[in-house]
């Protein structure tokens, strides 16, 4: 029942993710949907103009309950509590997500692209890191590529929603870039219009996202074979949003770029190549500072990191290990009580 509720939320609210998630293995897909549904609910809470002033404290309270394995009576919370325990997801990754929501709530703006990436790391790379853990991968290089995919997707979202955000009095475009093009950020926010100067800023943001997609593509081969096509599909579908913005003359102020259902299907088919062939590609990249704290949060040697076998087998092994740990705790407590 909880998963069905999460799935309905994602089907209605995150069509690009839902399209890609359909080709994940069932157990991985279910956990991914639980994670995305929770994130979606929080995002809606933060975006609600009528939300109470203590909305962030409410979210933090829900997080406390999830990590205490006593979630509030909400389907997404109950489902996520299972996920964070099963996959050993560090709490500070979800805390970073909440921090990003807090920045949204405060109407924070960003002077440089690096500052914008600090924000994107919190609201999107966090999800990339947690998805990687759900797939049973804790390798540092793969985690970095996953976080970069999160950066790319968030920058794409920002490029797509320039006009919509501005009409809601939100500005995510780097102020430094606007000023370089002769745009007064505050004045433009009061009267958001499309012109050649703003098109150059949008193109620059798309180019930065494209660079992140290219870097992220090197991580697909490090994922379980039965997960590669879904992650490749997510990258292809989101990057297609950028191509649609370009086809619309870079005008995301007066219109919103949408990828058609037919195009998504074609990209899903294209992504299947990743499950048939995905070469082991090694590449040396410079570090992106904004995502390093997320990678550092993950224990490189989780109890199951050495375990070989299918993803499903690894999940079963993890659950079995946790049951053993719990039994040992009970035995230790009983032993102490007897003495």
Image (cartoon, helix red, strand yellow):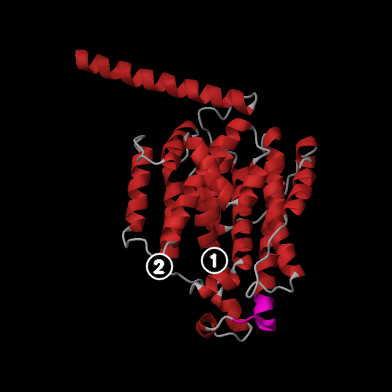
* Residue 308 pos. (x, y %): 63, 24
The region drawn magenta spans: 193-201
Mark 2 or mark 1: whose residue is earlier in sequence: 2
Question: Which residue carries the number 2 mark?
Answer: 106
Question: Between 48 and 218, which is closer to the camera in this rendering?
Answer: 48
The secondary structure that most of the magenta stretch takes on is helix
Q: Residue at x 62, y 48 (%)?
A: 17
Most distant residue in the left direction? 339
Secondary element under disc 2, as helix, strand or loop, is loop
Question: Which residue carries the number 1 mark?
Answer: 116
The answer to whether residue 153 is above or below residue 108 is above
* Residue 126 pos. (x, y %): 52, 50
Q: Residue at x 32, y 54 (%)?
A: 57
* Residue 333 pos. (x, y %): 27, 19
Secondary element under disc 1, as helix, strand or loop, is helix
The answer to whether residue 219 is above or below residue 323 is below
Q: Residues within 10 Å of mark 1 (few under 14, many from 20)?
A: many
Question: Between 176 and 71, which is closer to the camera in this rendering?
Answer: 71
Q: Residue at x 67, y 56 (%)?
A: 238
Distance from disc 2 to disc 1, alpha carbons, whole Å, reads: 15 Å
Q: Seen in the image, is 250 located left or right of residue 60?
A: right
> Where is residue 249, by image quadrant?
bottom right
């Amino acid at each position: 029942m909880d998963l069905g509720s999460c799935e309905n939320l994602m089907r209605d609210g995150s069509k690009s993710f839902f399209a890609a998630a359909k080709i994940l293995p069932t157990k991985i897909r279910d956990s991914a949907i639980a994670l995305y549904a929770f994130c979606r609910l929080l995002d809606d809470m933060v975006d609600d103009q009528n939300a109470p002033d203590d909305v962030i404290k409410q979210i933090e309270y829900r997080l406390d309950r999830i990590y205490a394995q006593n979630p509030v009576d909400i389907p997404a919370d109950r489902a996520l509590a299972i996920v964070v325990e099963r996959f050993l997801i560090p709490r500070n990754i979800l805390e970073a997500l909440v921090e990003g929501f807090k920045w949204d709530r405060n109407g924070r703006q960003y002077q440089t692209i690096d500052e914008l990436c600090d924000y994107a790391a919190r609201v999107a790379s966090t999800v990339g890191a947690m998805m990687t853990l759900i797939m049973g991968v804790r390798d540092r290089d793969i985690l970095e590529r996953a976080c970069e995919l999160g950066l790319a997707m968030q920058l794409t979202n920002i490029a797509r929603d320039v006009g919509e955000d501005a009409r809601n009095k939100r500005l995510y475009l780097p102020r430094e870039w606007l000023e370089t093009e002769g745009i007064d950020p505050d004045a433009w926010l009061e009267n958001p219009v499309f012109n050649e100067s703003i098109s150059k800023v949008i193109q620059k943001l798309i180019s930065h996202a494209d660079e992140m997609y290219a870097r992220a593509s090197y991580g697909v081969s490090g994922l379980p074979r039965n997960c590669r096509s879904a992650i490749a599909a997510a990258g292809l579908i989101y990057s297609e949003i950028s191509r649609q913005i370009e086809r619309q003359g870079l005008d995301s102020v007066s219109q919103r770029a949408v990828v058609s259902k037919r195009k998504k299907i074609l990209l899903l088919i294209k992504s299947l190549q990743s499950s048939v062939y995905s070469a082991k590609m090694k590449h040396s990249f410079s570090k992106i500072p904004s995502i390093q704290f997320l990678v550092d949060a993950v224990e490189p040697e989780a109890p199951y990191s050495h375990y070989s076998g299918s993803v499903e087998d690894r999940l079963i092994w993890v659950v079995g290990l946790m049951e053993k740990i719990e039994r040992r705790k009970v035995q230790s407590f009983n032993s102490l009580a007897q003495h």
